[in-house]
Amino acid sequence: MSNNCAVILAGGKGKRMKSELPKPLFEVLGEPMLEWVIKACKNAALNDLCIVKGYNAHYIDEYLCGRYETVLQEEQKGTGHAVMQARKFLEEHLDSNTLILYGD
């Protein structure tokens, strides 16, 4: 039986934000953008999530408190490279329907 899962790309710096906080953690209507995406995934029955973190990744770790699997994109080399960081997660979910989403 296959699951539905998602890889959420949450490594963005948000240069225009002029902040140390990763862009997906900026709040919209009182919640981080990343949380809006996570809630949408849950509402769409995406059971397993992998969050790709990058810029100041420790903020993402602190926010998630271990709720979801994470992987680190040490160097920001684009969207395709970010997805490649989740390779192990994707290989573990070969029989799943997988959605790739932006965390912001």
Image: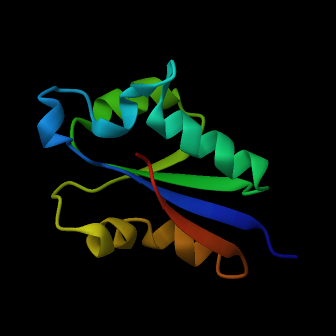
User: Which quarter of the rendering shows the C terminus?
Assistant: top left
The residue at the point 46 percent across, 36 percent down is 33
Question: Would you place residue 19 above or below residue 81 in this image?
Answer: above
Left or right, 44 with respect to 15, comes to right
Numbered circles on residues, count: 0
**Residue pushed farthest top?**
30
Question: Would you place residue 56 above or below residue 95 in this image?
Answer: above
**Residue pushed farthest front?**
29
The location of residue 67, given as percent across then percent down, is 60, 35
Q: Nearer the viewer, residue 46 or 2?
A: 46
The location of residue 9, given as percent across then percent down, is 40, 55
Q: Residue 98 falls in which quadrant of the image?
A: bottom right
Question: Would you place residue 10 above or below residue 78 in this image?
Answer: above
The residue at the point 46 percent across, 48 percent down is 70
User: Which quarter of the rendering shows the N terminus?
Assistant: bottom right
**Residue pushed farthest right?**
1
The location of residue 29, given as percent across then percent down, is 51, 22
The location of residue 53, given as percent across then percent down, is 34, 47
Q: Residue 62 falls in which quadrant of the image?
A: top left
Left or right, 21 with respect to 50, comes to left
The residue at the point 27 percent across, 56 percent down is 73
Q: Residue 25 falls in which quadrant of the image?
A: top left
Q: How is the image coloured?
A: rainbow
The residue at the point 59 percent across, 68 percent down is 99
